[in-house]
């Protein structure tokens, strides 16, 4: 197979199976580029993405394997629990730290492509919740590559396309099925490629983190400033990436502001449910102690235990009502990524 002239990297999450099918269906047989695809998937999921994409278009679709040399006109699909990266002309599968709690992550693929392939990179953001892919697409743009976003009006989940459009001056906003044809034409008509911007030391550090090659935690602490937040993954301090609403902990876990806020909400809810359980168990305990006191004829301790039982029961009821009615107000329809995504069918 021929060596690729360009590298197309595409990322999707919620609603992404349909978007990727349409995207791959629009890729021509003579595409002079290799295509790497990331879809958010649970760590324990079976990898059926390549089989789905193989049935969707004219190009062969393969499950990515570490060390595979890239070929033009081939689609390579990410696998669960590994970041899909590129190192020069080859695929690199990494178990580097998660970003937004995800592995594989979209930003990781986009960053490695931008750093390795520069202006020959084409980044594509498709349907998905939250904002994965925005930071990576911004780096692709800075390195002179082409940037494409699925039309948010068409996307099943529009948060990822909306985020990319809000933060990156993209080259094309298109329905998923039209992206392939437009990109194939762009590759053949681009002419002289723009010079990439100088890579920052932070961009190189993040690429090392993605690849699992971070040497020590001090690299992060020296490069960026702490913000006083804790990493939901490991509990360590978070450091703010300059000029971006993104954060890294000292061991490399990454979070965007939106994903961090959502994860903090999840952890708050877990803590509140834990409080409900503890309060109900305390109520049961003091009721048992009250019964024991009454059996021994100790009325004063029994009355005290009865008061405590009422207090614990009331507190548990208030918290339970807060938890079960908290999504009834304004903003309760906030778009989040389903835990079951992706659904392979």
Image (cartoon, rainbow, N blue to C red):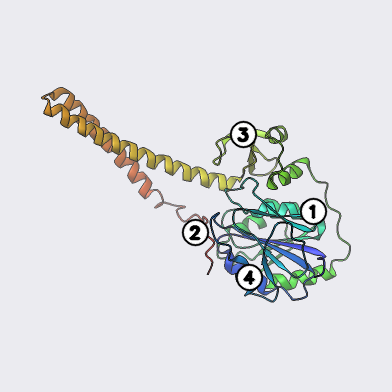
Label 4 and label 1: CA atoms lie apart by: 25 Å
Q: Would residue 54 appear left or right of 143 to someone viewing this image?
A: left
When the figure is inspected, residue 52 is found, relative to residue 315, above or below; the finding is below
In this rendered view, identify the residue nearer to me: 237 or 62. Answer: 62
Image depth: mark 2 or mark 3 in front: 2
* Residue 85 sits in quarter: bottom right
User: Which residue occupies the extreme right position in the image?
Assistant: 192
Q: Earlier in the sequence, mark 4 or mark 1?
A: 4
* Residue 110 sits in quarter: bottom right
What is the secondary structure assignment of the residue under circle 2? loop
Q: Are marks 2 and 3 in contact (CB under 8 Å)?
A: no
Label 1 and label 3: CA atoms lie apart by: 31 Å
In this rendered view, identify the residue nearer to me: 153 or 12. Answer: 12
What is the secondary structure assignment of the residue under circle 3? strand
What is the secondary structure assignment of the residue under circle 1? helix
Residue 90 lies, in percent from the top left, at 77, 58
Q: Residue at x 82, y 69 (%)?
A: 2
Q: Residue at x 45, y 41 (%)?
A: 268
Image depth: mark 1 or mark 3 in front: 1
Label 2 and label 3: CA atoms lie apart by: 32 Å
Q: Earlier in the sequence, mark 4 or mark 3?
A: 4
Residue 213 visible at all: yes
**How busy is the neighbourhood of tag 2: few (under 14 within 10 Å), some, or many (20 plus)?**
few
Q: Earlier in the sequence, mark 4 or mark 2?
A: 4
Q: Tell me the tag on residue 227.
A: 3
Q: Tell me the tag on residue 340.
A: 2
* Residue 219 sits in quarter: top right
Residue that carries the numbered disc 4 in the rendered image: 53
Q: Residue at x 78, y 68 (%)?
A: 72
Residue that carries the numbered disc 1 in the rendered image: 116
């Amino acid at each position: 197979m021929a060596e690729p002239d360009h590298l197309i990297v595409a990322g999707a999450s919620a609603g992404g199976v349909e978007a990727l099918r349409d995207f791959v269906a629009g890729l021509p047989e003579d595409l002079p580029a290799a295509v790497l695809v990331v879809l958010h998937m649970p760590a324990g999921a079976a990898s059926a993405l390549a089989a789905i994409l193989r049935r969707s278009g004219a190009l062969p679709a393969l499950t990515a394997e570490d060390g595979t040399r890239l070929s033009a006109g081939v689609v390579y699909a990410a696998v669960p629990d590994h970041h899909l990266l590129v190192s020069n002309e080859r695929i690199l599968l990494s178990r580097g730290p998660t970003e937004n709690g995800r592995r594989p992550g979209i930003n990781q693929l986009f960053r490695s492509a931008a750093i390795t392939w520069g202006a020959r990179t084409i980044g594509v953001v498709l349907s998905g919740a939250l904002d994965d892919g925005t930071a990576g697409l911004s780096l692709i743009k800075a390195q002179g590559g082409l940037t494409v976003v699925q039309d948010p009006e068409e996307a099943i989940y529009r948060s990822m396309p909306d985020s990319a459009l809000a933060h990156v001056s993209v080259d094309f906003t298109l329905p998923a099925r039209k992206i392939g044809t437009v990109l194939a034409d762009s590759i053949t008509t681009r002419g002289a490629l723009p010079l990439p911007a100088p890579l920052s030391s932070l961009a190189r550090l993040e690429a090392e983190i993605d690849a699992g090659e971070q040497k020590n935690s001090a690299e992060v602490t020296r490069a960026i400033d702490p913000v006083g937040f804790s990493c939901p993954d490991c509990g360590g301090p978070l450091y703010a990436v300059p000029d971006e609403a993104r954060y890294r902990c000292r061991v490399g876990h990454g979070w965007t502001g939106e994903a961090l806020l959502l994860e903090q909400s999840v952890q708050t809810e877990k803590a509140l449910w834990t409080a409900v359980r503890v309060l109900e168990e305390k109520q049961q305990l003091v009721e048992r102690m009250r019964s024991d006191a009454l059996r021994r004829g100790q009325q004063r301790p029994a009355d005290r235990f009865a008061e405590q039982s009422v207090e614990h029961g009331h507190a548990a009821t208030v918290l339970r009502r807060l938890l079960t009615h908290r999504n009834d107000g304004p903003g309760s329809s906030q778009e989040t990524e389903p835990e079951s995504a992706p659904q392979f069918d």
